[in-house]
Image: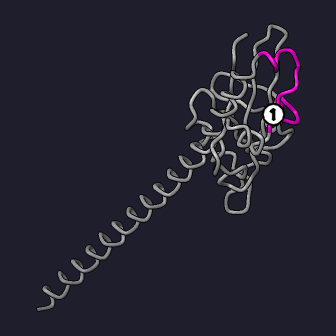
């Protein structure tokens, strides 16, 4: 009888450990899924705005190269999302506030060759659980592929990816996420 109780106790302990192990794995999978969904949502929002800036720059290439005024755009090399929407470069309903609470900004530069490059970037760094989160910012940028850039705590004045680094258009802020555009001359 004592032997059976001892075996039952051991079996109960093993089953409890297995149960808690399964619960731990399920909780971790749910957390991973939520982070992945958030990263994808943020990347898709940035990708949409970046595509509209690319379209704007390509359509207004000559005006940008010559420094001409562009109807409905106060500063042609830094159109706001509201201006891009009102001029139908960006679909209505896209928010100028990022899913992580910052504002999207744009900047375009015309090179002496006539090529146009630029960024859609977050005005401030990505805040996650109350603190700057460069890791998450760079994961969002990574989801954009070659056009994705981010800044880190170690190099806040630079945004970069695996192949390029440039000055941070937002200034000296870590956890900036940006999507780049390019229009050839």
Q: Which residue is mark 1?
A: 168
Q: Is residue 23 left or right of residue 138?
A: left
Indicate whether residue 158 is drawn in magenta: no
- Asked where in the image residue 165 lies, by quadrant, the reply is top right
Residue 49 rendering spot, x and y as whole percentages: 66, 39
Image quarter hosting the N terminus: bottom left
Residue 157 rendering spot, x and y as whole percentages: 83, 35
Query: For the magenta stretch, what is the residue range?
Result: 62-79
Residue 181 rendering spot, x and y as whole percentages: 68, 26
Picture layout, residue 43 above or below residue 161: below
- Residue under the point 78% across and 15% down: 62
**Dot 1: what SS?**
loop
Image quarter hosting the C terminus: top right
Q: Is residue 38 left or right of residue 115?
A: left
- Residue under the point 29% across and 69% down: 18
Q: Which residue is most to the front? A: 71
Picture layout, residue 34 above or below residue 14: above
Front-most of 167 and 78?
78
Indicate whether residue 76 is drawn in magenta: yes
- Residue under the point 72% across and 56% down: 101
- Residue under the point 72% across and 49% down: 96
Picture layout, residue 159 above or below residue 86: above
């Amino acid at each position: 009888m004592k032997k059976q109780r001892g075996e039952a106790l051991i079996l109960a302990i093993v089953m409890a450990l297995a149960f808690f192990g399964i619960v731990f794995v399920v909780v971790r999978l749910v957390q991973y899924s939520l982070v992945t969904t958030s990263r994808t949502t943020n990347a898709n929002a940035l990708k949409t705005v970046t595509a509209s800036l690319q379209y704007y720059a390509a359509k207004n290439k000559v005006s940008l190269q010559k420094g001409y005024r562009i109807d409905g755009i106060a500063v042609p090399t830094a159109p706001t999302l509201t201006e891009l929407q009102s001029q139908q470069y960006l679909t209505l309903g896209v928010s100028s506030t990022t899913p992580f609470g910052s504002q999207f900004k744009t900047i375009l530069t015309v090179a002496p060759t006539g090529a146009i490059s630029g960024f859609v970037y977050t005005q401030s760094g990505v805040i996650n659980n109350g603190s700057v989160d460069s890791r998450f910012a760079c994961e969002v940028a990574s989801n954009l592929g070659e056009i994705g850039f981010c800044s880190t705590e170690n190099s806040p004045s630079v945004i970069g990816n695996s192949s390029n680094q440039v000055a941070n258009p937002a200034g000296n802020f870590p956890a900036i996420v940006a999507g780049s555009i390019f229009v050839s001359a």
